[in-house]
Amino acid sequence: MDWLNAIVQGTLLGGLYALFAAGLSLIFGVMRLVNIAHGDLIVLAAYLGLTVTSALGIHPLASLLLVVPAMALIGYGLQRGILNRTLGGDLLPPLLVTFGLSVILQNGLLEIYSADPQKMNAGLLETASVLVGGISLGILPLAMFAIAVAVIAGLQWMFYHTALGRAFRATSDNQAIAQLMGLNRAHVFGLAMALSLAVTGIAGVFLGIRTSFDPSMGGARLIFGFEAVIIGGLGNLWGTLAGGVVLGIAQAIGAQINPGWQLLAGHIAFLVLLAVRPKGLFPRMDG
Amino acid sequence: MPDPILAIAGLDAHYGDFQALYGLDLTVAPGEVIAIIGANGAGKTTLMRSISGLLRNQAEAIRYQGEPIGHLRADQIAARGIALVPEGRQLFPSLSVEENLIIGGQLGRRGPWSLEAIYALFPILEERRAVPSTALSGGQQQMVAIGRALMANPDLLLLDEISLGLAPVIIKTIYDALPGIVSSGMSAMLVEQDIGKALSMSQRVYCLQEGRVSLQGRSDQLSRAEIGRAYFGV
């Protein structure tokens, strides 16, 4: 029963990892940008949630109403102000710039919030649970998983059934020709980053409710996000969710064997999958 | 003669250090079809890229409907009503046939062209509307590329080598559709390797040679010998 429990809890944790990964996957898909600062932006969102929660005295989940739009605005501004200038034939400039951004974010957060671990208090919601078949399921992890699935489904729907999704796919295919269709590349990229950071906003607030956080923990979130994207297969959003779940289960099983093995087990699962299926579980069918 | 819809004066175009066009002058009247002919490397595609904004130029070198547009981005130029059918079709592989057409019309300019009108012009596209654009034959892809440009309801349609790499019977189908397209008052510029086709489809013709206009005139008045000299520069 302990093992089944570990798998179930790992699956639910995987939802959070899928949220870490979805934004990363989205911008890589649209503009081939690898955002090294993604993990630190998740932590930034957690701190924004903390500030909003304590300043207004509202529930952490209610802070999403402010954090998500704020992150989207930051994303649009960041893309139009800085990142668009780095995009071109070469993959290196955006890598370097987002790496620099990562350093700036970490140190900025350290300066403002100090290195003390912080946590958002979600009250009763944190301990409430339901008993299903002998396994105790936390309401909060269940809700996070449900929201992660809803976010992935929403992104998938947006990509394939809306004008915005069409613009994203067209720009991803061929930027010059998309421009001929009247799509301003700079604006489309700005919208993609806004959407990516909106998802990051949700991920950050959930992270801050689930665990304590400090300014230095972005790097590990970035790695989890990368691993989920790669396990699932690049450019496949449902694959990203599967990747997050695989990572979550591997970590939970590792922790079940030995509490010190949690992270190691996740990385090993990633390496094994990469060796066996270099293109991920669900590589993109077309192209 | 009415005011031209497009007036190019002294257009120089460069790719880095390489100069592709030298002081080019050209006009297109409203409703007129002009053909651009010339050997490979004469600057035909560069001219198309310059007009459509894929290659940025001096503002005043290209005037469209009386306003300088040479400095504008491609999306700004598209919004003013110039659509390009690019060389090599260049459809969006991630988009279905119908999505390729819809994205062509996403600026929402009004006019006679809609999905229904495109499907009436090329019925095969309606049959294959849901398949990825990469699943089509070359000729069908060219129909989508033309349809995609028409969906923008342009006032000026640029067609770059639309017969390239297609079977003669397909070329005929596509060119048979052209008079119907331009009869709605649209102006068109046609880049074409096949000189016979270029002359029969257009009212006036410009021949380019090494980035300069080597000959221009009415399509029905130029002799083959004149064109041959202007084409090859002998």
Image (spheres, helix red, strand yellow):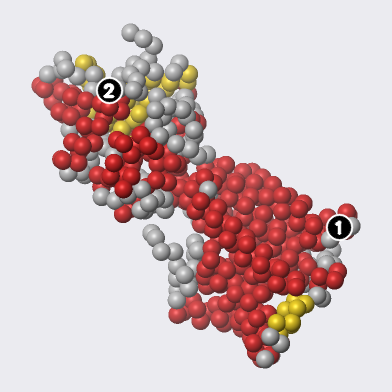
- Residue B34's tag is 2
Query: Depth-wise, is mark 1 or mark 2 nearer the camera?
Result: 1
Please give the chain letter of the residue carrying mark 2. Answer: B
Q: Is residue B221 left or right of residue B174?
A: left
The residue furthest top is B1
- Callout 2 amino acid: Ile
B122 in relation to A29, above or below:
above
Determine the residue positioned at 24% across, 44% down: B139
Determine the residue positioned at 86% across, 69% down: A123
Determine the residue positioned at 38% across, 51% down: B130
- Residue A58's tag is 1
Q: Nearer the viewer, residue B67 or A134?
A: A134
Residue B101: quadrant of the picture:
top left
Spatial distance from mark 1 to mark 2, Cα to Cα?
67 Å
Q: Nearer the viewer, residue B110 or A172?
A: B110
Q: Secondary structure at mark 1?
A: loop
Q: Is residue B186 left or right of residue B171?
A: right
Which quarter shows the C terminus of chain B? Answer: top left
- Residue A158's tag is none
- Place of residue B100 in the rendered image (x, y in percent of width and height, measured from the top left): 40, 44
B60 in relation to A199, above or below:
above
Q: Is residue B209 visible?
A: no
The residue furthest left is B225
- Place of residue A68 in the rendered image (x, y in percent of width and height, measured from the top left): 72, 53
- Callout 1 amino acid: Ile
A62 in relation to B17, above or below:
below
Q: Secondary structure at mark 2?
A: strand
- Place of residue A137 in the rendered image (x, y in percent of width and height, measured from the top left): 72, 79
Determine the residue positioned at 63% across, 83% down: A7
- Place of residue B178 in the rendered image (x, y in percent of width and height, measured from the top left): 26, 30
